[in-house]
Amino acid sequence: MSSKLIIANSSRLFNYTMILDGRAMGEVSPLAPGIITIEPGNHELSFKDSDVDNLPTNCKPICIIIEDGKTLHLNVTTEDFSIRIYDEQGTHLNGKRGFLCGKIAEGVRIENPIA
């Protein structure tokens, strides 16, 4: 079986490329969700701005552990030249301080050192 990542893009200006385990996996357009099917297990997820003409942005990756048949909903947006990843509850998953670790959805954990 497989699992799903559903990424909502709340930016009205930017397209994002999903980077899963170091590989580009598709685009997320403004105000439209991007959906990818993934194998269960450990994955590293990040994003990059698809438009090379815009100012550069950075995105710290998150490490997720997803069980078989589960769906993870995330939201992505740009703020202060940083691409931010949020869970459904609005928790900033790739922030700058502390260590975020634990269950963020049914059958999904995050192991994300924030430095």
Image (spheres, rainbow, N blue to C red):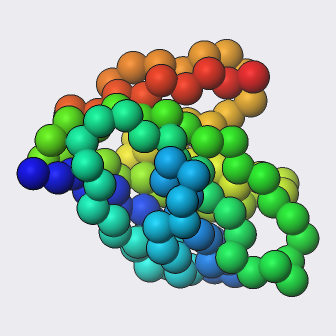
Position of 46 with respect to 48 (left or right) is left
Q: Position of residue 24 (x, y in %)?
A: 54, 66
Q: Is residue 62 above or below residue 28?
A: above
Q: Quadrant of the C terminus?
A: top right
Q: Quadrant of residue 95?
A: top right
Q: Can residue 10 be seen in this snapshot?
A: no
What residue lies at 78% left-to-right and 53% top-to-bottom?
58
Q: Can residue 41 be seen in this snapshot?
A: yes
Position of 54 with respect to 36 (left or right) is right
Q: Is residue 46 above or below residue 37?
A: above
Q: Position of residue 71 (x, y in %)?
A: 23, 50
Position of 21 with respect to 53 (left or right) is left
What residue lies at 59% left-to-right and 69% top-to-bottom?
17
Q: Quadrant of residue 64?
A: top left
What residue lies at 65% left-to-right and 50% top-to-bottom?
84
Q: Of 53 and 78, which appears nearest the observer?
A: 53
Q: Quadrant of residue 104?
A: top left
Q: Position of residue 52 (x, y in %)?
A: 81, 79
Q: Is residue 21 above or below residue 96?
A: below
Count how many numbered circles sit on residues in the image: 0
